[in-house]
Amino acid sequence: MSESSPSTPPDSSRTLEFRVPEMDCPSCAGKVTNSVERLEGIDDLDARVTSGRLVVEYDPTRTSEAEIRERVHAAGYEVATADPERTLSVPEMDCASCANKVENALEGVDGVREIEARPTSGRVTVSVDEGTGTETIVDAISSAGYDATAVGDGSDAIVDDQSVWKGRRAVGTAIGAVVVAVGMGLEFVFPAVDPLLGTVAGRPYELSHLLFILAVVVAGTPILRNGYYSVRNRSLDIDFLMSLGIVASVAAHHPFEGAMLAVLFSVAELLERFSMDRARDSLRELMDLSPDTATVKREDKTEETIPADELEIGDTVVVRPGEKIPADGVVLEGQSAIDQSPITGESVPEDKTAGDEVYAGTISESGYLEIEVESEANDSTIARIVRMVEDAEREKTEREQFIDRFASVYTPIVVALAVAAVVVPPLAFGASWSYWFIVGLTLLVISCPCALVISTPVSVVSGITSAARNGVLIKGGRYLEAVGDSDVLAVDKTGTLTEGDLAVTDVIPLEGADEDDVLRRASALERRSEHPIGQAIVGYAEEAGVVPEVEDDPDVSEFEALTGKGVRAEIDGKTHYVGKPELFDGLADLEHVHATTDGGVALTEMGYGGRPQCDREGCLDVLAEVVPDLQSEGKTVVIVGTDERPVGVIGVADRVRPEAKWAVSRLQDQGVRVVMLTGDNEGTARAIASEVGIDEYHAELLPDEKLEWIDRLEREAGSGGTDDAGHVAMVGDGINDAPALATASVGIAMGAAGTDTALETADVALMSDDLTRLPYLYELSGTANGVIRQNIWSSLVVKAVLAAGAPFGIVTVIHAVIIGDMGMSLGVTGNAMRLANVEPEAPERADSGSER
């Protein structure tokens, strides 16, 4: 449990955060919040299911921490001893070796419980006891040789790439390189002018040797310093191994090899830091999306510019054309086209007017807006996205875990071989000490697994941040991997393949009436109904410019809602009905009626645009053709009529998303088996599946039956349909499909922008309702998995080839540093950066699949 320091006075409000590990589902959260809410003085509750935490804002004069704990316990859950987290920026921690050193230094600190060092973002997150201060952690990290500052203390900006090349180490490396070049000229090009300075331990030393040693001192001091910290922290890392190699080279009268090792490794370190900074760029871009300042409109109509993180809920902010919106909120006044690409990835601006929701970091392109702030700066949608992208790095993928285990075995073995190469041949076979020392030194360099260890996390971070820029939030590397490994995608229908909003698709007039007449009568009745179908008809009538016969419907009376059937009312003294076909006599058995009455014309013969003339019986015969036709297309049929006869038919349906057919086709082209799971009826499911091109669908499913289908699909996706489950992803709206989303290997939530539930519970969140992001997600994941495999295997193969060539003298220290360390580190990082170039593909026809 941790306590925050609110901006309000300490005697008015206090915020506590409790860890409740067993609160791991919405039902659990409901029980806990219901129990705690009974206490007086509870101002706000936030139950975070995915992290198992409960944030409580309360009045300490009316209740206490002990009472809150008791209410959590009364709900059947235990409050764990919460460990406050401290996040620190450590810019120079840019490799796995650095991270290990920092972790080793922190492990010995009293009060430190959990440590997570993230070299790709240059940050360390530490869980500590309440009495452990930030300075203690900073001192411990300093003991490992790294500077650290607490995030939030002005250290949010990650190391700038220019500082890498203008820093002390870069200058020392450049000087060392010049000195080595002069020494090489004396020793190898003009040996006659290389004066002998004397002998040391019976060995002659020329001026060139002195220059090589000087180069070691100038360029190698940072390496030796880091090696010292490695020894202090008992870390068998690259700094220790390189320091050992440099010192041994000079001591064994091989100053040239020591100088080359110092200079080349320093160059490699600088390049690696520069390359890592390029990997951090995308995360820095996310951090910089929100503006630093905001213009607040006060009650006296004056405007004041304040830091954006000082905004409070309820403030009114002013945003002018071209400015960024500083906080999540609702438009109070004005209208503007808003560029929401930082949140949703959509490049087309969206028009916003009074009452519409807007997000921090988005840009007002054309108009003046006044916005009421609805969330604090650290709780905005973009802030949560940044936190989740950062947290995504903390969860290691299966490949990362394998590489870590492999490296922990590989490095000691190769170091042992290096020592054996130095000692065994000279002692056992009388071989040259000098030759086998170089072989051992080369193996020592090859033993450093830097490129291998960094190959996966740098790819994961690059992929996740690239996805975030395109409106796809991936919660962790294992989900990035899992999407690409899943051959089956289960798709919900309502709100996913369809827009989730009912709309009028057909208006078919009968008895000589026209479409306006049918809509006018229907909207007059439905205007008084709250049913979604009625609201869809009213909205369509308004868009078509059709208004009730008399303003404000004064002649509509005796309104009555007929539960489950429709509505009835008097219009100008005549009874009208709008509802299901069963409302009209004889329509219950329409499937047995044939259009045989004189004057009855089947619409299937003349097209829905016709205006058939029919008496009562003739109209019933016509409807016998129309109703089944519409129902077979998955539409809900509404009949409009009087006691005497029906006058029109209205078809209502949930529209298929314009891009749905293209997205399904593209997924199938990528080898994904798309299966629709829906609770809707068989006819509607069949119609929608046919329209978007899905061959396999399962309809009329209850929530628990959806779970059973997810399990069945996973077994089918496994090896030969056995009990070895395969990977199945599922996409839904993030709320209604929560159980199935949680059961699937990867749960993908649609339209998560501004939806706390979807952001918290989904493994992957599509920030907009754009199905084109699904093929993009699969392409990105497949590419990421390919990049990771390439990085791992290329690192292993290069290390193996170098190790095999070292005993034969084919591979020297220079090759090992340039190719095995510097080259491979740059190679895997550059390869990972390719993921930033994966962009969503736009469908050729935006209206594909939308026409009915």
Image (cartoon, grey):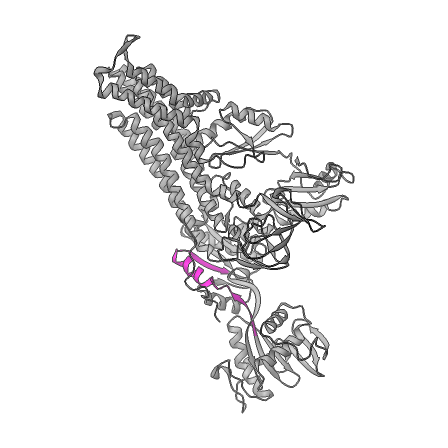
The residue sitting at the bottom extreme is: 598
428 left or right, relative to 31: left
Quadrant of the frame with the N terminus: top right
Q: Is residue 660 magenta?
A: yes
| Foreground residue among 250 and 392 | 250
Q: Residue 306: horizontal and vertical position, in percent?
A: 63, 43
In the rendered image, the vertical position of residue 319 relative to residue 221, given as above or below: below
Counting every numbered tag in the picture gives: 0
Q: Residue 310: horizontal and vertical position, in percent?
A: 64, 42
Q: Quadrant of residue 680?
A: bottom right
| Foreground residue among 707 and 786 | 786
705 left or right, relative to 784: right
The residue sitting at the left extreme is: 192
Q: Residue 355: horizontal and vertical position, in percent?
A: 64, 58
Q: Is residue 237 visible?
A: no
In the rendered image, the vertical position of residue 499 relative to residue 285, given as above or below: below
The residue sitting at the front extreme is: 302
In the rendered image, the vertical position of residue 384 relative to residue 1, given as above or below: below
Q: Is residue 380 magenta?
A: no
Q: Is residue 830 visible?
A: yes
Q: In the image, which residues are magenta?
A: 651-676
Q: Residue 41: horizontal and vertical position, in percent?
A: 76, 43
